[in-house]
Amino acid sequence: METNVNKTLYPLIRDYMSAMGTSRTTLTALKSYMDAIRRLKCTESEFWPLLMELNKVIRNAEPAVVPLVHLIEEFEVELQAHLNKGLELAKTKAIEILNHKLKRFETDTQMVTEQCMELIAPGDFIIVHSPTAYISNALVRAHTESKRPFQVLILKQDFHRTKDLVDALAEHQVPHLLISEHNLSHYLGEANKLFISAVTITLDGKAITGLGTANVVSICHAYKVPVYLFVESMKFSHKPLPDQNIFKEEGNRTEKDYDFRITTFSHDYVDLAMVDHLITEEGEQPRRN
């Protein structure tokens, strides 16, 4: 049976992922975890069971936050040696281990930004959909630091994330156009790259992505616009698509006095067969398909 904590945290995690992306959600979650340990008041015997209760919630999030799950699993193994040596030592070591995980993931994310920058060439007209922070940062740095002339076609999706990207490109005077996602067909003759990110790469060769990404990738694939997918290695899951806990909701809705029942999913997924280049912090990788 789901606890009240689970019911509260699952939609909260989805909201964070929608607003900030999976990478920043992972970093925020690790910082919150460390803060929770600092504030935790319990006995030594209660410490580990309380951590395991929180870790269970993290593992069962909908959808799965795979990099966070991987880092928490490593954390559990590494902390074992420091248990039963006093509560304060256990708390100190737990925070040290989590902080190391956070710094490592930050480094991976920065390296993905560097890889993305290297793939921006003079004269590019790059479609960007569901942008994560490292794609946004790469576009800005390629323009401001490398002085490469290129243009960005932004597909409007989530309002807040689209606004953040538009503001960043405008602030740094990166040439860009903002269009509705369904107007992409008007620019397919000009665009030469599509940059996307993902929540997860599954064991059976699927990329779990933001809503709308599957449609954009499909049309770009059909028109032979190369698709570049950027992810940290920590986002590679050991499980197939059906085990990724993509949130499915069925409910009633009313629009213009018409009542209907609709099924919605929290995320899309893309077959890696439609991805031309899979890029991690270590460069281009073979696709799982």
Image: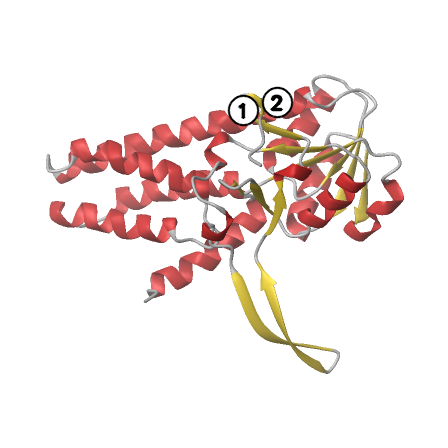
Residue 223 is left or right of residue 161, and the answer is right
Please give the name of the residue rendered at 51% of the width and 59% of the height, measured from the top-left corner.
247
In the rendered view, tell whether residue 184 sits above or below residue 279: below
Which secondary structure lies at badge 1?
loop
Which secondary structure lies at badge 2?
helix
Residue 219 is left or right of residue 74, and the answer is right
Residue 190 is left or right of residue 34, and the answer is right
Q: Going by the picture, which residue comes out furthest to the top?
A: 146
| Disc 1 residue type (three-letter) | Glu
Residue in the foreground of this view, choosing between 113 and 275: 275
Disc marking residue 115: 2
Q: Number of callouts in the render?
A: 2
Q: Position of residue 146 (x, y in %)?
A: 72, 17
Residue marked by disc 1: 281
Could you give the CA–CA distance between mark 1 and mark 2, rounded to whole angstroms? 7 Å
| Disc 2 residue type (three-letter) | Gln
Q: Position of residue 88 (x, y in %)?
A: 16, 37
Q: Are marks 1 and 2 in contact (CB under 8 Å)?
A: yes
Q: Position of residue 145 (x, y in %)?
A: 69, 18
Are there few (<14), some (14-19), or many (20+) residues within 10 Å of tag 1? many
